[in-house]
Amino acid sequence: MAKQRVILEMGAGNDLHGRDYTKAAIRAVDDALHHSSLTFIRNLGIDKSTLQVDVTIGVQNPDAVDTAKVAARLPVGKVTVRAVLGGLDVPDDDGDDVAVIASAAIEVRVEAKG
């Protein structure tokens, strides 16, 4: 059976100094996680290990994101993380420091019944 998306949660995160795209991505994932509680999983008796959790991170330098570190922030399910072009790099007036802003989309899918 096909898995259907039951949750789409978004978050934003940043690294104000240091140009650390992974840190910004993790903060975006944490932001999204802090906006949701998947109580239906327990209430419906769904096995947490069967959840498919797909994370998309948007940053200006996708290759600089350590997707394994980002995936480690997700507490349940079979997690995949991909980094794509998005987010923002905001240089300071002198151009020697950049604030990195990342966006995250977390999709949770479960097996469709019936």
Image (tube, grey):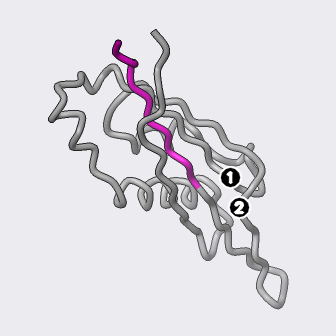
Farthest front residue?
114
In the image, residue 71 lies at what x, y percent?
A: 47, 38
Q: Residue at x 63, y 75 (%)?
A: 17
In the image, residue 38 lies at what x, y percent?
A: 28, 43
Give the residue type at disc 2: Gly
**In which quadrant of the rendered view does residue 56 lie?**
top right
State yes or no: residue 111 in magenta.
Answer: yes
Highlighted magenta segment, given as a residue range: 104-114
In the image, residue 81 lies at what x, y percent?
A: 57, 36
Quadrant including the N terminus: top left
The residue carrying mark 2 is: 87
Q: Secondary structure at mark 1?
A: strand
Of residues 17 and 54, the one nearer the viewer is 54
Circles 1 and 2, Cβ within 8 Å, touching? The answer is yes
Q: Answer above or below: position of 87 versus 45.
A: below
Q: Residue at x 77, y 57 (%)?
A: 60
The residue carrying mark 1 is: 58
* Of pointers 1 and 2, the one earlier in the residue sequence: 1
